[in-house]
Amino acid sequence: MDREKYTWYKLSVSETEIIQHGYPIKVVEVNGKRICIARFQHEWFGFAYTCPHSGGILADGFIDFKGNIVCPLHSYKFNIQNGRNSSGEDYFLKTYPVVQNSEGVFLGLENGFQPEE
């Protein structure tokens, strides 16, 4: 990942917050856009708020044991690492890089990103 091509935004979330409240997928607003974030196998991941198939709210879905984001509407599955559809349909889920360091958790948006209206 070329970190130079991203603008990084600090998120106000923590692993403790997600675990304590029982939300495996959390919604954050970054630069005017709702984005889902989650932890899987001790890593943070960022991905689109809605399913590319029918617009289901992915925060209402879950992450299965293989690391697939499962949409709550039709159970379409997307790989949490790269957004590829893993249940056989021809859809792709937008993903965002997330890094954690001593200063916090940061989500990267590509430079030149414009939020949807």
Image: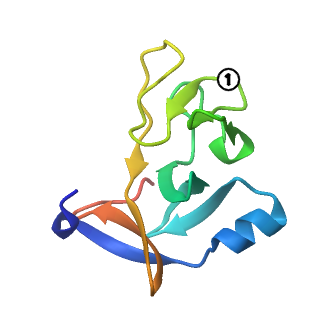
Seen at 59% across and 37% down, the residue is 69
Left or right, residue 75 beside residue 21 = left
**Quarter occupied by the C terminus:** bottom left
Seen at 54% across and 24% down, the residue is 53
Q: Residue furthest bottom?
A: 103
Q: Nearer the viewer, residue 56 or 97?
A: 97
Amino acid on which disc 1 is placed:
Ser
Q: Nearer the viewer, residue 103 or 61?
A: 103
Left or right, residue 2 beside residue 39 = left
Left or right, residue 40 beside residue 2 = right
Q: Residue furthest front?
A: 41
Residue under numbered circle 1:
75
**Quarter occupied by the N terminus:** bottom left
Q: Callout 1: few (<14), some (14-19), or many (20+) C-alpha neighbours within 10 Å? A: few
Seen at 71% across and 39% down, the residue is 61
Q: Position of residue 98 (x, y in %)?
A: 42, 63
Seen at 22% across and 63% down, the residue is 112
Q: Position of residue 54 (x, y in %)?
A: 59, 26
